[in-house]
C-alpha cells in the first residue's frame, strides 16, 4: 500500500477509451479506478480498454472494481477489455469464468486491433 | 520589647469546654485536611524549628487536635513524642480560643499547673500556643513554644506565633489542594479505567455475538448419510469477523442428498447477510431443480434480485449425491467460479500411491455478479474407497514461507504425498497443511470432505478395485456427465 494508483487516459477514439493503470489496486485505491472508468463511460466512451502493464498488485477489491466497471460498460452498451493482465488476476478471471466475458490481451495494441475488428464503428 | 503581656487574669480557661456541635464541625474540618497520622513533612518541621529559634525555646511543635488526642504534626526539641492526651491547660485550652494563649509560668496558672507536661518529667514552666484557624473559623490545632523556665513574651512575639500558625494553615491548604488534584486525577483514571473495562466487555459481547452468529451460519453438525463419511472444518481469520465461507449437507428426499460449499465476497455483516441468503436459496432451489447448474442459476437470479445486496456475489460448488448401483454415489458437481474440488483415490497398481484429481468443469462463472451467468457441471462416480475434498480459496491462497501462494498444485501435491481417501483423514491432513505454514491461512477457510468407505457396514466387500472416474465428457453414457449450460 505504499504505491499510489496512477490512472492515465492515453487514447480516446469515439466510443473507445484506453486507460493506463499503474501501481497497486487494493481496497484503498480501487474506488478511484472505478470512478475514473465510470467517468469515461459517462463521457461517451462505453468501450473501455484497461492497460494493466504497470499494475504491481491487485487483490479482490480490484477484482470487484473490474466487475463493477464491466457491469456499467455493459449497461451502456459498451464493453470492458483488459490488456497486460498480471498473472494472479488472470488466474482469478479464469477461475471465476469471467475471462469469457472480459477478454484480455497481451498488450493494448492487440486489444485495440481485436476491438476494432469485432466492434463495428457506429454509422 | 515593650508591651509585655502576661496571662490574661480574667480568662476562665478551665471552664472552657468544647460545645458538642462546634466540636463536631471542627472535627469535620480536621478530617477534610486529611493530615492526621501522616508522615513528617518538611514544611511543618521548618515551622516548628523556626518557632524554637525565634523564641529561643528548647521545644516547639505544630499540633493537630483530634477528638481524643493532641497529635504532633511536627515537633522540635523532643524526640519520640507522637501524641499526648487532650488534657486542659496547654494545647487543649489553646484550641478553644481564637487568640494566642500565653502562660508565662505554668505553676501559677490554675489550669496549666495540673497538666502532665507541667507535672511530668518535662516540667514545662512557660507555654504559648497560637491556634491554627481555617478561613471558615475552625481551629484545627496549634503552633506552640514551650520552655522549662518561666518567661514573658511581647505582643509582637505573640503576633509572630499567630503568623506561624497562619503559615501552617497555608501549608495545609496547599497540601489539601494538591490532594484534591490528585484525587480528581485518580477519579478520572478510575472513570477511564471503568470506561476501558466497559469497552472491553462490549468488545467481548460483540465478539461473542459474532461468534454465535457465525455458528448459526454453519450447520450445527453434519447429518448422517448412509454409506458416506463426512467431515468438515471451518476457521475464520479473525474471531470477530463473520466470515463469508459457508457449507451444508442436506437430504433431497428418496436417497438423494445435496451438499454445497462456497465463499461470499467480502466480510462482516453484509457478507453474512449474503451468506445467509445464499444458504437458504440453495436449500430451497435444490428442492425444485434436479440439475445442479439450475440450482446455481436460481441462486444467481436471487442474488441479483436482492436490492439490499447490490454487487455482492459468491463462488460456490453445489453437488448432488445419488446412490450408485455398484456401490458408492453418483456425484454431479456444479461450479460457479470456485476452485476445483479434489477427487482422491488410490492410484492404479499396488504401490499404495494416491491419485488426486481436480474436478473442474470449464466455464462456471461467479454467482450473483452478472445476468445470464453460465455454470458448468460434471458428473462422476464416487466409488467405495474414493474421497472428495471441497475447500475455499483461503486454503489455496495461503502463503508459503517464500511468500508465494500454496495454489491448487501445492494442495494437490501435499495430499498426494500424505493423505488417504477418507473424509476424516482428508480434513485432518489439510488442517495440518494450513497450520504448518508460518503465516497461517490469512483468510477464512472452509473444508468439506466426503468419502465412501471400502467396507460397507454390513461387511460385504465393496468393489473397490473396479473404481474409476467416470464421465468426463458428455459422450460418456455411464452417467449424465459434463453438462455445460
Image (cartoon, coloured by chain):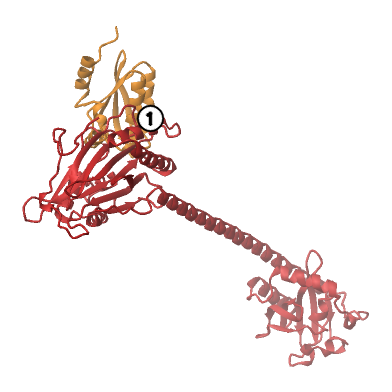
Q: Is residue B183 above or below residue A70?
A: below
On screen, residue B87 versus residue B73, left or right, reads right
In this rendering, does residue B144 appear at all?
yes
**Which colour denotes chain B?**
red
Query: How many marks overall?
Result: 1
At 25% from the left edge and 53% from the top edge, which residue is drawn?
A: B228
At 44% from the left edge and 49% from the top edge, which residue is drawn?
A: B213
Q: Label 1: chain?
A: A
Quadrant housing residue B417:
bottom left
**Which colour denotes chain A?**
orange
Quadrant housing residue B167:
bottom right
Residue A49 coordinates in the image, percent (x, y): 27, 22
Mark 1, residue position: A32
In depth, the one of B86 and A85 nearer the eye is A85
Farthest residue to the right: give it.
B10
Residue B201 coordinates in the image, percent (x, y): 51, 57
Q: Could you say whether the residue bearing mark 1 is in a helix, strand or loop? A: helix
Q: Is residue B56 above or below residue A33?
A: below
On screen, residue A66 versus residue B10, left or right, reads left
On screen, residue B362 versus residue B105, left or right, reads left
Residue A60 coordinates in the image, percent (x, y): 32, 37
Quadrant housing residue B290:
top left
Quadrant (top left, top right, bottom left, bottom right) of the N terminus of chain B = bottom right
Q: Is residue B456 above or below residue A42?
A: below
In this rendering, does residue A4 appear at all?
no
On screen, residue B410 versus residue B126, left or right, reads left
Amino acid at each position: 500500500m505504499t504505491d499510489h494508483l496512477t490512472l492515465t487516459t492515453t487514447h480516446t477514439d469515439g466510443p473507445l477509451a484506453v486507460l493506463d493503470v499503474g501501481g497497486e489496486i487494493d481496497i484503498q485505491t480501487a474506488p478511484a479506478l472505478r470512478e475514473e472508468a465510470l467517468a469515461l463511460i459517462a463521457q461517451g466512451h462505453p468501450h473501455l480498454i484497461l492497460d494493466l502493464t504497470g499494475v504491481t498488485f491487485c487483490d479482490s477489491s480490484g477484482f470487484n472494481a473490474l466487475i463493477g466497471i464491466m457491469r456499467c460498460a455493459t449497461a451502456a452498451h459498451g464493453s470492458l477489455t483488459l490488456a497486460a493482465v498480471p498473472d494472479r488476476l488472470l488466474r482469478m478471471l479464469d477461475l471465476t469464468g469471467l475471462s469469457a466475458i472480459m477478454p484480455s490481451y497481451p498488450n493494448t495494441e492487440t486489444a485495440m486491433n481485436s476491438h476494432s475488428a469485432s466492434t463495428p464503428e457506429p454509422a | 520589647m515593650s508591651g509585655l503581656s502576661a496571662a490574661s487574669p480574667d480568662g476562665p480557661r478551665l471552664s472552657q469546654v468544647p460545645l458538642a456541635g462546634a466540636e463536631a464541625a471542627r472535627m469535620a474540618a480536621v478530617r477534610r485536611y486529611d493530615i492526621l497520622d501522616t508522615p513528617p513533612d518538611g514544611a511543618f518541621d521548618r515551622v516548628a524549628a523556626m518557632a524554637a529559634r525565634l523564641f529561643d525555646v528548647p521545644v516547639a511543635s505544630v499540633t493537630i487536635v483530634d477528638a481524643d488526642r493532641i497529635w504532633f504534626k511536627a515537633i522540635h526539641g523532643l524526640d519520640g513524642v507522637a501524641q499526648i492526651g487532650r488534657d486542659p491547660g496547654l494545647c487543649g485550652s489553646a484550641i478553644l480560643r481564637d487568640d494566642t494563649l500565653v502562660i508565662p509560668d505554668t505553676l501559677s496558672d490554675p489550669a496549666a499547673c495540673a497538666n502532665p507536661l507541667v507535672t511530668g518529667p518535662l516540667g514545662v514552666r512557660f507555654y504559648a500556643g497560637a491556634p491554627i484557624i481555617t478561613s471558615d473559623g475552625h481551629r484545627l490545632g496549634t503552633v506552640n513554644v514551650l520552655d522549662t523556665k518561666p518567661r514573658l513574651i511581647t505582643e509582637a512575639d505573640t503576633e509572630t506565633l499567630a503568623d506561624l500558625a497562619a503559615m501552617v494553615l497555608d501549608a495545609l491548604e496547599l497540601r489539601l489542594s494538591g490532594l484534591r488534584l490528585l484525587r480528581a486525577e485518580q477519579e478520572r483514571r478510575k472513570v477511564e479505567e471503568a470506561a476501558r473495562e466497559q469497552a472491553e466487555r462490549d468488545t467481548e459481547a460483540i465478539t461473542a455475538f459474532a461468534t454465535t452468529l457465525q455458528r448459526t451460519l454453519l450447520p450445527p453438525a453434519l447429518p448422517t448419510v448412509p454409506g458416506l463419511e463426512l467431515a468438515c472444518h471451518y476457521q475464520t481469520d479473525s474471531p470477530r469477523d463473520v466470515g463469508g465461507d459457508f457449507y451444508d449437507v442436506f437430504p433431497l428426499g428418496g436417497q438423494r442428498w445435496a451438499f454445497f460449499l462456497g465463499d461470499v465476497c467480502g466480510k462482516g455483516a453484509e457478507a453474512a447477510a449474503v451468506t445467509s441468503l445464499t444458504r437458504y436459496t440453495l436449500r430451497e432451489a435444490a428442492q425444485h431443480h434436479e440439475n445442479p447448474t439450475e440450482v446455481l442459476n436460481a441462486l444467481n437470479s436471487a442474488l441479483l434480485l436482492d436490492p439490499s445486496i447490490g454487487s455482492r456475489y459468491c463462488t460456490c460448488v453445489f453437488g448432488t449425491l445419488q446412490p450408485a448401483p455398484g456401490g458408492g454415489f453418483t456425484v454431479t458437481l456444479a461450479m460457479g467460479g470456485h476452485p476445483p474440488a479434489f477427487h482422491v483415490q488410490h492410484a492404479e497398481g499396488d504401490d499404495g500411491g494416491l491419485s488426486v484429481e481436480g474436478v473442474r468443469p470449464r466455464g462456471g462463472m461467479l454467482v450473483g455478479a452478472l445476468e445470464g451467468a453460465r455454470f458448468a457441471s460434471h458428473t462422476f462416480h464416487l466409488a467405495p474407497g474414493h474421497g472428495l475434498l471441497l475447500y475455499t480459496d483461503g486454503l489455496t491462497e495461503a502463503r508459503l514461507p517464500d511468500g508465494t501462494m500454496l495454489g491448487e498444485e501445492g494442495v494437490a501435491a501435499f495430499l498426494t504425498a500424505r493423505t488417504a481417501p477418507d473424509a476424516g483423514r482428508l480434513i485432518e491432513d489439510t488442517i495440518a497443511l494450513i497450520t504448518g505454514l508460518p503465516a497461517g491461512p490469512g483468510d477464512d477457510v472452509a473444508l468439506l470432505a466426503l468419502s465412501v468407505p471400502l467396507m460397507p457396514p454390513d461387511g460385504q466387500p465393496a468393489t473397490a478395485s473396479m473404481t474409476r472416474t467416470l464421465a468426463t465428457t458428455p459422450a460418456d453414457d455411464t452417467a449424465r456427465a459434463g453438462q455445460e449450460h
